[in-house]
Image: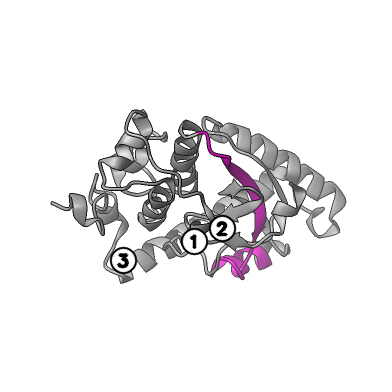
């Protein structure tokens, strides 16, 4: 699976078109939205606005908030895949966050004299094909993530603290092996990462508001749940 770290993302259409089953609990939630297959459910989640969830993160977050992050979007579809016994899994990876990915981070990185800072992102894997359900969303990035520095399986229920531990382990290796980072400490790298992620958040909020879909609107519970699905439109 190591080649997955360099593979390009694929469209949602590569995912299986398995029928949803009404006797299964999580399937029923998507069926009530007028969706009939796993692929349609994934397309629906892909179309939901990108935004942080106000309710506790979990498989229900998308339904309650009408939006999601890479974590909650891919988490919900992974839960659905497990219910249908499909080989679709969520993976997590660290990528090079710099000006090429997020506008404004170049100034931050230049201040500290480093070419990039590691940042996390998750995606789906189906038979060695990667799918990003946040691609094309107004998420603050200039482009989708292609190459990753490192990746690992990210099953539902994985705690954010576990990602932080693995991220810090990777950064420690970066500090000892890459001369460009040796003048900084682990704490400084994590602080730089936080500054760059704040820049990404500001870009996301600005792009959403320019499109008339400000974060404060996109997070009204259920606001976008039925958008584009005539069967259940009020």
- Which residue is located at x 58 percent, y 40 percent? 87
Among the 4 quarters of the image, the one containing residue 102: bottom right
Residue at mark 2? 196
What's drawn in magenta, residue-wise?
A: 85-110
Residue at mark 1? 135
Mark toward the viewer: 3 or 1: 1
Earlier along the polypeptide chain: callout 2 or callout 1?
1
Earlier along the polypeptide chain: callout 3 or callout 1?
1
In this view, the residue farthest toward the left is: 234
Mark toward the viewer: 2 or 1: 1
In front here: 40 or 123? Answer: 40
Residue at mark 3? 209
* CA gap, disc 2 and disc 3: 20 Å
- Which residue is located at x 25 percent, y 55 percent? 229
Q: Is residue 148 left or right of residue 214?
A: right
| Percent position of residue 121, x then y | 58, 50
Q: Are marks 2 and 3 in contact (CB under 8 Å)?
A: no
Earlier along the polypeptide chain: callout 2 or callout 3?
2
| Percent position of residue 117, x then y | 67, 56
């Amino acid at each position: 699976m190591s080649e997955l770290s360099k593979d390009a993302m694929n469209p949602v259409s590569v995912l299986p078109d398995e029928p949803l089953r009404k006797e299964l609990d999580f399937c029923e939630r998507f069926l009530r939205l007028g969706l009939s297959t796993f692929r349609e459910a994934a397309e629906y989640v892909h179309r939901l606005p990108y935004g942080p969830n106000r309710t506790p993160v979990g498989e229900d977050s998308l339904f309650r908030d009408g939006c999601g992050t890479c974590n909650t979007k891919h988490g919900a579809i992974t839960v659905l895949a497990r219910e249908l016994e499909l080989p679709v899994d969520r993976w997590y990876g660290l990528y090079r966050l710099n000006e090429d990915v997020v506008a404004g981070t170049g100034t931050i990185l230049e201040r500290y004299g480093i070419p990039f800072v590691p940042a996390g992102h998750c995606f789906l894997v189906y038979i060695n094909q990667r799918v990003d359900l946040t691609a094309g969303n107004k998420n603050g990035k200039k482009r989708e993530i292609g190459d990753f520095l490192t990746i690992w399986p990210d099953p539902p229920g994985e705690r954010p603290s576990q990602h932080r531990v693995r991220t810090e382990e990777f950064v420690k290796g970066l500090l000892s092996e890459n001369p460009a980072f040796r003048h900084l400490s682990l704490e400084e790298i994590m602080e730089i990462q936080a500054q760059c992620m704040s820049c990404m958040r500001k870009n996301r909020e600005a792009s959403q508001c320019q499109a008339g879909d400000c974060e404060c609107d996109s997070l009204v519970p259920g606001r976008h749940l039925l958008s584009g699905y005539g069967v259940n439109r009020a």
